[in-house]
Amino acid sequence: MAFLTVSELSKSFGAVVVADQISFDIEQGDAVGILGPNGAGKTSLFNLITGTLRPDRGRIEFKNRDITSLSAAARCKQGIARSFQIPQPFGGLTVFENALVGATQGAGIRGREAEDHVLSVLANTGLLPKANVQAGQLTLLERKRLEMARALAAKPTLLLLDEIAGGLTEAECGALIETIKRINKGGTTIIWIEHVVHALLAVVKQLIVIDFGRKIAEGDPKFTMDRAEVKEIYLGVDPDG
């Protein structure tokens, strides 16, 4: 059985279809990228996987358990955590305190165990020197790292990253790539939505491309990016041109 199985997942808001019978399997330890133009349904797919949206049809299985009807909080406790495209930390709390919220509310740990875990997460995401800095004073890269840290503090086995490289310089993006690689090599399965294609391709081993809520391609990243329908729909290249 796959680590995560998405089967015939569908979701509409009136005439707007955000997921149209999407199916895929992800194995434990994978790093999977999701590409698609704006409005393709990528973030909605994340919302369906994490439980903030309920599907109209379809099924989601995680670690051999049907989680389709579970709440977002229950899925977090099962080991699914995510970052958000726009970082929204608790600006008046320190970096350590922000991550501690993830540990206590997501992982359900307290006291010294939670504190030690948070310090380990901050070290792994390059934020340990900023532990006592208020989150409102962080740079964009640091806020994006904090998004990851808060999610990792919940002790996920599946981490979903939503456009975490957007707005970064080349140097910042390179540093972020190395952090994500390290997290994945540490055993955390990753699904990453990203418009910064070179960053995504530096990490992922499998690529899923969606458009108008439909999966149009899946497979090896280089092979998938070379497919005519991907070039036409995502890159705007005429396959007959």
Image (spheres, rainbow, N blue to C red):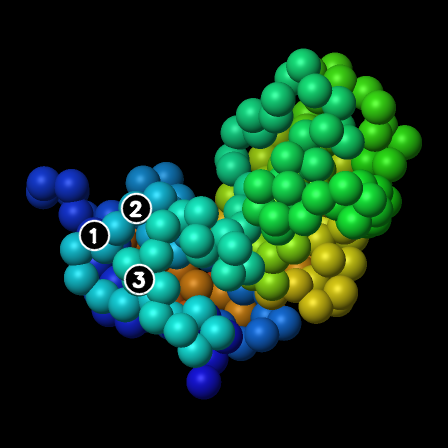
Q: Depth-wise, is mark 2 or mark 1 nearer the camera?
A: 2
Q: Above or below — where is 105 with respect to 19?
A: above
Question: Which is nearer the eye, 189 or 115?
Answer: 115
**Residue type at mark 2?**
Leu
Counting residues from the start of the chain, the first of labels 2 and 3 encountered is 2
For disc 1, the neighbor class at 10 Å (few under 14, some 14 to 19, many from 20) is many
Question: Which is nearer the eye, 166 or 30?
Answer: 30
Q: Classify residue 40 as left or right of residue 85.
A: left
In this figure, which residue is indicated by the disc labeled 2? 53
In this figure, which residue is indicated by the disc labeled 1? 11
Q: Considering the numbered disc 1 on the image, is that residue within a helix, a strand or a loop?
A: strand
Q: Above or below — where is 236 with respect to 181?
A: above
Task: Quarter of the image for the C terminus: give it.
Answer: bottom left
Residue 68 - label:
3
Task: Quarter of the image for the N terminus: give it.
Answer: bottom left
Q: How far, Cα to Cα, is label 3 from label 1?
A: 13 Å
Q: Residue at 84%, 24% (x, y): give it.
A: 132
Evaluate if marks 2 and 1 touch, with contact meaning CB atoms under 8 Å apart.
yes
Question: Which is nearer the eye, 221 or 43?
Answer: 43
Residue 89 - label:
none
Q: Residue at 69%, 63% (x, y): give it.
A: 184
Q: How far, Cα to Cα, is label 2 from label 1?
A: 9 Å
From this viewpoint, which residue is outermost toward the front? 111
Q: Considering the numbered disc 3 on the image, is that residue within a helix, a strand or a loop?
A: loop
Q: Considering the numbered disc 2 on the image, is that residue within a helix, a strand or a loop?
A: loop
